[in-house]
Image (cartoon, coloured by chain):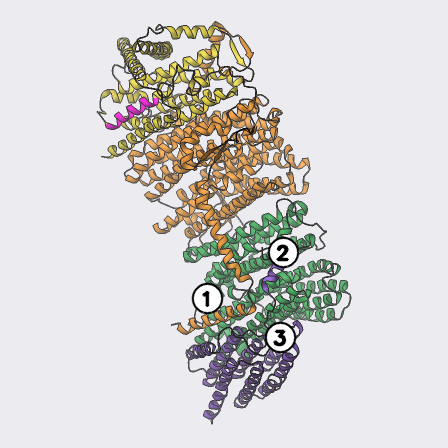
Chain colours: A yellow, B orange, C green, D purple
Amino acid sequence: MALILKLAVQAAQMMLVLALAPLLTGFVRKVKARLLRRQGPPLLQPYRDLARLLRKEVVLANSASWLFRACPYLIFAATWVAAALVPTFATGLMFSWSADLIVIIALLGLARFFLALAGLDVGTSFGGIGSSREVMIASLAEPAMLMIVFTLALVAGSTQLSTMAGFLGSGAAGLRVSLGMALIALVMVAIAENARIPVDNPATHLELTMVHEAMVLEYSGRHLALIDLSAELKLLLYVSLISCLFLPWGIAAPGAAISALLIGVATYLAKLALCGFLLAVFETSIAKMRVFRVPEFLGAALMLGLLATLLMFVSRSL
Amino acid sequence: MALSIILASSAAFLVLSALAILLHAQPLARIVVYGGSLILAGAGLAAALSALIARAAPETSILPVGLPWLGAHFRLDTLSAFFLVVVDLGAAAASLFALGYGRSEIAPQRVLPFYPLFLAGMTLVVIADDAFTFLFTWEFMSLSSWALVMAHDHVRENLRAGYVYLVMASMGTFALLLALGLLAGPDGAYAFSAIRDSHPSSAPAALVLVLVLIGTGSKAGLVPLHAWLPLAHPAAPSQVSGLLSGVMTKVAVYAFVRIVFDLMGDPAWWWSMVVLALAGITCVMGVLYALMQHDLKRLLAYHTVENIGIIFIGLGLALAFETHGLGWAAALAFTAALLHVFNHSLFKNLLFLGSGAVLGATHERDMEHLGGLIHPMPLTAFTFLVGCVAISALPPLNGFVSEWLTFQAILQSPQLPSWGLKFLVPAVGALLALSAALAAACFVKAFGVTFLGRPRTEAARRAHETDTFSLAAMFALAGLCLLAGILPGFFIDALAPIAKAMVGDSMPLQRDVPYLSIVPIAEARSSYNGLLVFLFMLFSGFAAAAAIHRLASNKLRRGPAWDCGYPDPSPLTQYTASSFAQPIRRVFGTLVFRARERVEMPPPGDAAPARLVVRLSDVIWDTLYAPIARAVEYVADRLNRLQSLSIRHYLSFVFAALVGLLLVLAIWP
Amino acid sequence: MSFNAVAAVLAIPAVAAALLALLPNYRLSARLNVLATLLTFLAALSLFFERPATGPYVLVDDLNNVFIVLTTFVGFTTSAFSASYIEHEIETGRLTPAFLRFYHAMYQVLMFAMNLALVTNNIGVMWVGIELATLTTVLMVGIYRTHEALEAAWKYFILGSVGIALALFGTILIYMAAEPSTGAGLNAMVWTDLVAKAASFDPALLNLAFVFLLLGYGTKVGLFPLHAWLPDAHAEGPTPISAVLSGLLLNVALYALLRFKMLLAASPNALAPGPLMVSMGLMSLVFASFMLYRRRDIKRMFAYSSIEHMGIVTFAFGMGGPLANFAGLLHMSLHSLTKSAIFFAVGDIAQVKGTQKMADIGGLTSTNPVLGWGLVLGVVAIAGLPPLGIFMSEFLVVSSTFAREPLLALPLVLGLLVAIGALFLRLNAVAFGEPRGLNHKAKGSYVPMVAHLGLVLAAGIYLPPTLVVWFQNVAQLLG
Amino acid sequence: MQNLTFDIAHLLAGSLVLVSFMLLYQDRLYALLNVYALHALVLALSVAWQAYAQDAPHLYITAAIALLFKAIVIPVALHRMIKQLGIHREIDTVVGIGPTMLLGMGLVALSMVVMLRVTTEADPLAREDLAFALSVVLLGLLMMVTRRNVVSQVVGFMSLENGLVLAATGAKGMPFVVEISVAFSILIAFIVIGIFLFRIRERFDTVDTHALDRFRGEQP
């Protein structure tokens, strides 16, 4: 019985993230439009786009290989699994022990790996631009992310997200400089990873500035739908990661009652809304930077992460 | 029993090479040599595995050869057994591959006799149990591999590669010779057992450590002693490159572990500092060099340097923890290192064999001339992709597991009291993370440019799938990569006795952990279940596919690439390897390689294309090796004046010597 | 004892020399030459089983037993090689039958002289033997009568004569040191008596004597400041003679030095000869290994490598101690085998390519596999790499030295490394790469080369226990 | 009486050293040869005296050889050779005469010092003789390395060898002395003949060694 309940909770979480991902994207777009005094697309527009794309037929470039067709599913699977492992409304989910934060990052890395390959597969120059810039960004973002993980892991004494969330939620960590640095770094990484302004612009097709869009240029129909969905999942993942680590309140403890779970869901939605709003505000208030400024941006994140870790190491010994 | 099987197999290897010389260049020779090597390696593998899994007590045997009053000591303990598994697994795969690939060999008479010798050398190094036998087999291994590197000596740079390799190998051997000589003491107690019993005082121990680092580092490819590696590994025939890169470097790791962890007694705390610093630099330098390459095999060779760095990070951490009495953490780091040894031998072999298949199909190593090979050779492409994912340390394959364990070990380092390590370890962690990310980038480039896109040359267009033997070898390795990735627990348990023997503690037994997941220290701290993640992804991927194909459209139409509407007829407009690496070169290259980009514009009216010329300078070569070479040249020139003097001058030398010695006598007390 | 091996070892070459001097037909005389050396070798072999009693003139002990057999063996193989090799010289007209007759006679005289120096128990006779050997080789080096051959011979002659004089002076000094305790006359020159009584000798005289002997015989060994004759003599003489020079004569001179070192070791308050030998050995080693880089004549290069190895051996004996001494003895024997094998190969190469200039030789492993790989194997051996025997001796020297005198081991290792670098740099060009130069048919037989290399290989893997025991005894005596 | 024999031997040996200095002092070839003849003569005398002192008759043979061969045959032969080969008559020195003499002094002092370390129970006659012999040897070597003409170098070698004979005869009851002196005479004969055969005019190596090396391919 307990097992079934656990499974149910796990399944619920997976479905939840799947369901919420487009909504979050739509919400961010809406808020941005509002801030720009525009009507903006309806909140549910992303769902419509996905549905339409799914119904369309795929137009495949002649030079595309089997890898090109397999990639969307691989990317989706990797991202979805990663997203499902991040505690949203409850910790200690059934499968959460099968992977810690490092694994989650690695899964995202896997998704990016195949996305970059897909960009190269057709053999167009734009795909090349996209992939090469993507890996350049990733080569700085990933270490930064790992540094953040180190910091948090040293605070919580674990790389297990549930444990971390629990520890940070208990307030035992207290306020720490390195935590602040880690938060800033994490936000910067999240922005870069999700191809948001100022690193990349999800809404542009101006070839010289785009990164993510350039890679998926050749995709169409259901493939494109999956790619977009995984991108939205990724955004959701980062948001819920930030919220479960730095706003760790109201998350249901393992084996909690249904009521606690419901509270968890409610607070989770609230956090999403908050983060989405902040993101929108940030994006509207800043300009896109040139591609070769990005390394400096991410380098700063890396340095922050390293600094946080070092501080951690030192302070732990005192 | 196991030991005698292994000794017999290495003897049989020697017989094989004799046969190869007798049969000369006939096709039969190929089958005999590679088939025989396959069988022998299989036998050795079985024996070593049985010894490793049965956790048998060390076996020893003494043959009446080598140093007359000592004899050749051989010993098979779990450490040797593990490295024997690595050696023989690689050997078996390479031999299987070569059964088919050897057909396209242009100079078989240069390869066949030395191939079994090389295998024999590696096998014997791992079980040697006295200083003389160890160095004898060690240098024998270098020498036979040198002959293999020189196999295609009509190519100029192969000559240079062989030369640099041989000189650096001899340097390494001399360093080890000095180290072991120091350990053995003036009256030559060369048996390892004797060395174990005598604990060297600290001052020589420091010297020994440095010498051992030079000796094994120069063979394993620690920066800055890696210079020969990217020259020699690509020069050899591909199956040998795989062995050189995937296996021989591991033999060097074995030597390091054997001497530093086993023979040298208790380590001093600063040893780990040296090792860690070197290893961190090695990681990043290796992968950065690799990113700048566009020769497929050289790129792979540089990646070996990076992975050696990762392995040595693990070993350094193990040293650090051991000195501070954190046995469990030491065991974690040590196991991580050994697991990475195993994993790297798997996928590096796989990748080199894949590059061999590409070479055989297109006669091209330069990625700029390849592309689109996934269409003519899909199976090779698939296995190569598996290798790429594995070496990029991405789940659910094996490369990730060992790096994950290494990260876990790094996370234990706040326990270390000493301040130097407190600052060094996080920095090393950052370097490790950086190199992991860069490795992924590098293999996107390697696979993407070689196999994806459209063929850039006629050679690539005319490529064809490789033969069955080669495919069998590559698929076997790929399967092992997956297996080691999703069921790491068994492999970790197999390593437990070694850690116990070397650092005095071992990781918790993974067999008892539910659901086959692995737990380095405690479940609350960290755990990873490769199997579950793999099934999870498999399930969701196929679920999505099924759902979409059932519920939504599954229609598909082929058409020209869209590419923002730009018509793009020529495959030359694709991103090349160097253009792919350009952003990263901008970020790191200018710093590390003094990379200079220059645009050569043709004069107005000239139809010639504008070119972007990139000049990279190998910092380490310029600052370390070139000066040494110049110094030797200088001294040689100076001394050479003594070659042509008149007899009177020579007589005056004699006279001077005589008077000098008489003066010595005169002032002798 | 019915059959006196020592007498045979001396008599056969003497008689053969006389015969060959009279015999006009050079083909026949070449065969006779081989036969004589073979008989000498067999006679020497019998010494393994039955040693003659030690007398005032004859001494066969653990030290020289091996060297006698080795010398006669290499003498035999070399004569076999020269038999197949020298005809070619007639065809190319570098030699006339008359000179060839002279050559064969001289060859036997050389054998006689070296055997004499080895088997004798009398330091005077030893001196005579070595000097006789020197003079004969001088004549043979000059045998091609070319300008530079004569120049080389002349250089060798003059430096050799000075060496002779110095060695003699040393011998006289030994005599004077011994004379008070042994009484005047012959006993003061019998080595065994000298060693027995050495403790009572005047140390100062012994020291002085050793200095002169070191320089005198050192000239023959080719140690650094005294080496000048060696490269040219090797490069300009007939190849079989280069093989004998490098393989045997240097050994014999060094053997003489060893005898006197044992003498000093036996006298407690004489100065330790170690430092002198160590420093000379190191100098020769480092100097020669650097000289290897700029060589363009292949024979001259290997001549320098002989200097290098004599340096190693001298260094080892200078270090002393059971390990180093054992290594030194082993190194001496293996080096003579290897180096002569290399010279056989080089001789054939020079005939195949019609030149000794390395610039005109290339890609031998592809054009003449046996010759090319033979050379490679020889160079591998001489560079001290396994599985060949010299690895063992170098292993022992280096490791034991480093454990005792780390600072001395560093220049040693540096020298060895530089030598390896130089040797393989040249080997790359000569044995590998695109074939270069002419390609005649090789006349010289490959058998001697293969035989020598086979022995060296076998020694690298397994040493016969009796030999080991002998060497260990000698190592004890050498102190 | 013992005393007297000792003094005479001492005197002769000393005068041999003196003559060596005279050799160093010469700057004309003919004069050099004459002084060498004197050198050999003194040697012969001292050897004869040793023969008498040690009453070892075989030493008289050595003395005779020294007298006939070295004091007469060789100088005459060299005379004629100088004429025939047209070797010009000055001795060109590397180091000037004066410095050479000073060096010689140093060498003699050195050999004395070295010899004085020899414990005194060694036969004093032998000891003194040996000191002088050593200095003669050294001076001969010095001459070889500081003179450029072949003839003076040969003379240097011969004086060196005289020193050897002096030492050998000084050693009481040393066997083979005669044989050795004969052997050396032959050696010298070889050298002289060699000079004549190879037409070596000025030095041991008239040939330009650099040219040779180029010929041997030892120069780039």
Identify the magenta region: A177-189
Residue C143: x and y in percent read: 68, 66
Magenta-span inclusion, residue A188: yes
Residue behind mark 2: C341
The answer to whether the residue labelled 3 contacts the one labelled 1, judged by CB atoms less than 8 Å apart, is no
Badge 2 local density, few (<14 within 10 Å), some, or many (20+)?
many
When asked about the image quadrant of residue D151, the answer is bottom right
Label 2 secondary element = helix
On screen, residue B14 above or below A302: below
What's the CA distance linking mark 3 and mark 2?
A: 34 Å
Residue occupying the far bottom of the picture = D1
Identity, as a three-letter code, of the amino acid under mark 1: Leu
Residue behind mark 3: D191
Name the mark on residue C245: none
Residue A168: x and y in percent read: 25, 22
On screen, residue C323 above or below A25: below
